[in-house]
Amino acid sequence: MVKKATELVAEANVAVDKLSVEEAKKLVGRGDVQFVDVRDSSELASHGRIPGAVHATRGMLEFYADPSSPVHKPELAAGKRLILYCGSGGRSALAAKTLKDMGLENVTNLIGGFTAWSQAGGPIEH
């Protein structure tokens, strides 16, 4: 069965928790929350990121999340609530579902991604 990217994103959005920008803005800087930026490096360099976000590109996410991987990022296994975002919410929905499939439980997708975040006046660091 062949699936389109839009179908995969829709399925991922059903499987993962979602968070609005307004809700997410209240969580910046909290010790029990880790924002995870899954955008490409060029997007991060051009537009900045949510303060304190760890950069874990979509292409390397599984390796960063796996504690047995040599490139593991401990921020992804710290037991915090992970809030994933990309440019508009599609890649981060897929990434959040992948992390859930890997056994991480407290994973959330930021609705509208970084575009919605910046349009809503969310804080950005460069």
Image (cartoon, grey):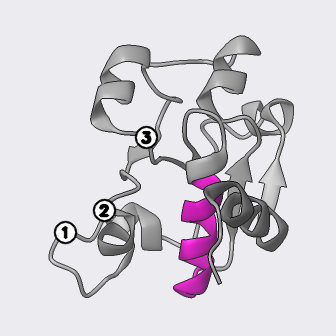
Q: Could you tell whether 21 is left or right of 80 in the image?
A: right
| Mark identifier at residue 60 | 2
Quarter of the image holding residue 120?
top right
Image quadrant where one finds the N terminus: bottom right
The residue positioned 78% from the left and 73% from the top of the image is 15
Res. 107 image quadrant: bottom right
Image x and y of residue 20, in percent: 84, 39
Which circle marks residue 71 in the picture?
1
Within-10-Å neighbours for mark 3: few <14, some 14–19, many 20+: many
Question: What secondary structure is the stretch in magenta mostly built from?
Answer: helix
Q: Say few, some or many: other residues with alpha carbon within 10 Å of mark 1 (under 14 / 14 to 19 / 20 or more).
A: some
The numbered mark, 2 or 1, whose residue comes first in the sequence reads 2
Q: Which amino acid does the dot numbered 2 rest on?
A: Met
Residue farthest to the left?
70
Labels 2 & 1 near each other (Cβ < 8 A): yes
Q: Residue at label 3?
A: 39
As measured in the structure, the alpha-carbon distance from the residue carrying label 2 to the one carrying label 1 is: 9 Å
- Distance, label 3 to label 2, CA atoms, is 11 Å
Number of dots carrying numbers: 3
Give the amino acid at mark 3. Answer: Arg
Secondary element at tag 1: loop
